[in-house]
């Protein structure tokens, strides 16, 4: 891809760029980032070339944090998340068997209703392209219906369409997407997508507590203005920042999410909040604060995905998985004691 001042109105994943897109800043970023991508691609090719396997170690973790080449993402995600092992242990052709089996028409109708709402600004999900054989919209429908029948406790939950849609843009394969979705829903983010959303509600409370510990002024200000943390973080967490951050930045976040687990979404959330502390504290009322939280996902750094990913491991400071586990337990116990 040659860098020029006349980038397409559509990005490499098929998303239309907004009218106010800053092409000048993007051109400057890409002139540096393309060099980074070329270097990373060579290193990844040596590490995970044809026929090679990945083992979890510090080298792989470092490589993942620095970004996975787009051409390798599907294979690497399956490997580092454990989804490939999950597929190996499952019944042969589980995905195909579910698709060929009987369907719950009420679930099918719910999924079909959400299809046109999924990435309406993406050329691969438009009404026109949906008429093509093996279209992205048809693949989206198949994966959501199959998973809804496979996991009856979840069925279909709004937000999954964005995750599956973006997975399909990367993997271009229904079955791979099905297994990555299963890994995310059942292991990485347990109880986020069940009817009570118990895991999601707990993790929003965990984020609030982490903000109270790390940026107490912001926590106090948000509390004083009466803005519920659920209003701020629900879309961030449910969609895993899809439809929130720029696409390449989201995929870099997902690289780390598949390797390191859910603590990554807390690192991203805390970085956004901590970087924009002064602007948040300037808000004098509820509506201004809501608008500011929308704007912090569009600041100059989020477009520069490489620098942004470096910042999520520096800005929030220490954030061990064990800390999040302890906070989840503490919050769950407090809720239970109030019943």
Image (tube, helix red, strand yellow):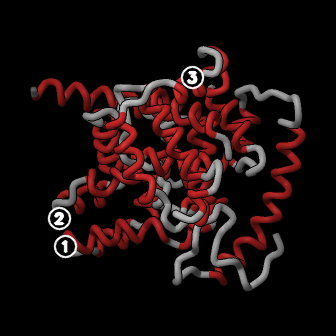
Q: Which mark is residue 263?
A: none
How far apart marks 1 and 2 lie (CA) works out to 6 Å
Percent across and percent down for residue 4 are 78, 82
Q: Is residue 205 visible?
A: yes
Residue 38, above or below 279: above
Name the image quarter holding the C terminus.
top left
Q: Is residue 308 visible?
A: no
Residue 123, above or below 312: below
How far apart marks 2 and 3 lie (CA) works out to 52 Å
Q: Secondary structure at mark 2?
A: loop
Name the image quarter holding the N terminus.
bottom right
Q: Nearer the viewer, residue 270 or 287?
A: 287
Which residue does the numbered mark 2 point to in the structure image?
225
Residue 172, above or below 197: below
Q: Do the CB atoms of the residues marked 2 and 3 lie less than 8 Å apart? A: no
Q: Do the CB atoms of the residues marked 1 and 2 lie less than 8 Å apart? A: yes
Asked if residue 236 lies left or right of residue 206, the reply is: right
Q: Secondary structure at mark 3?
A: helix
Q: Give the mark nearest the N terminus, 2 or 3.
A: 3
| Residue at 48% across, 37% down | 262
Q: Nearer the viewer, mark 3 or mark 1?
A: 3
How far apart marks 3 and 1 lie (CA) works out to 54 Å
Q: Which mark is residue 97?
A: 3
Label 1 packing within 10 angstroms: few (<14), some (14-19), many (20+)? some
Q: Quadrant of residue 35?
A: bottom right
Which residue does the numbered mark 1 point to in the structure image?
285
Q: Quadrant of residue 39?
A: bottom right
Label 2 packing within 10 angstroms: few (<14), some (14-19), many (20+)? some
């Amino acid at each position: 891809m040659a860098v020029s001042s006349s980038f397409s109105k559509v990005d490499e994943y098929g998303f239309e760029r907004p009218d106010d897109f800053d092409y000048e800043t993007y051109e400057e970023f890409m002139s540096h980032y393309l060099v980074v991508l070329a270097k990373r691609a060579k290193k990844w090719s040596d590490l995970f070339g044809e026929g090679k396997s990945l083992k979890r170690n510090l080298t792989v973790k470092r490589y993942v944090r620095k970004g996975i080449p787009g051409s390798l993402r599907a294979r690497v995600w399956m490997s580092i998340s454990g989804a490939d092992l999950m597929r190996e242990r499952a019944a042969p052709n589980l995905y195909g068997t579910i698709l060929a089996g009987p369907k719950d028409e009420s679930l099918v109708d719910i999924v079909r209703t959400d299809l046109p709402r999924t990435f309406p600004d993406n050329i691969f999900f438009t009404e026109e392209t949906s008429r093509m054989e093996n279209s992205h919209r048809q693949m989206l429908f198949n994966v959501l219906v199959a998973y809804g029948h496979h996991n009856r406790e979840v069925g279909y939950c709004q937000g999954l369409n964005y995750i599956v849609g973006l997975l399909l843009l990367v993997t271009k394969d229904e079955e791979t997407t099905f297994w990555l979705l299963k890994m995310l829903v059942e292991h990485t983010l347990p109880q986020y997508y069940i009817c009570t959303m118990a895991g999601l509600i707990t993790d929003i409370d965990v984020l609030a507590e982490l903000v109270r510990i790390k940026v107490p002024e912001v926590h106090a200000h948000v509390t004083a203005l009466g803005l519920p943390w659920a209003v701020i973080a629900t879309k961030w967490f449910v969609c895993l920042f899809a439809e929130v951050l720029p696409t390449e930045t989201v995929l870099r976040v997902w690289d780390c999410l598949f390797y390191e687990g859910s603590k990554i979404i807390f690192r991203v959330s805390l970085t956004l909040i901590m970087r924009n502390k002064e602007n948040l504290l300037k808000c004098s009322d509820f509506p201004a604060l809501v608008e500011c939280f929308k704007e912090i996902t569009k600041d100059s750094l989020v477009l520069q995905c490489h620098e942004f990913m470096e910042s999520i491991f520096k800005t929030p400071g220490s954030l061990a998985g064990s800390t999040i586990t302890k906070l989840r337990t503490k919050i769950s116990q407090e809720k239970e004691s109030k019943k």
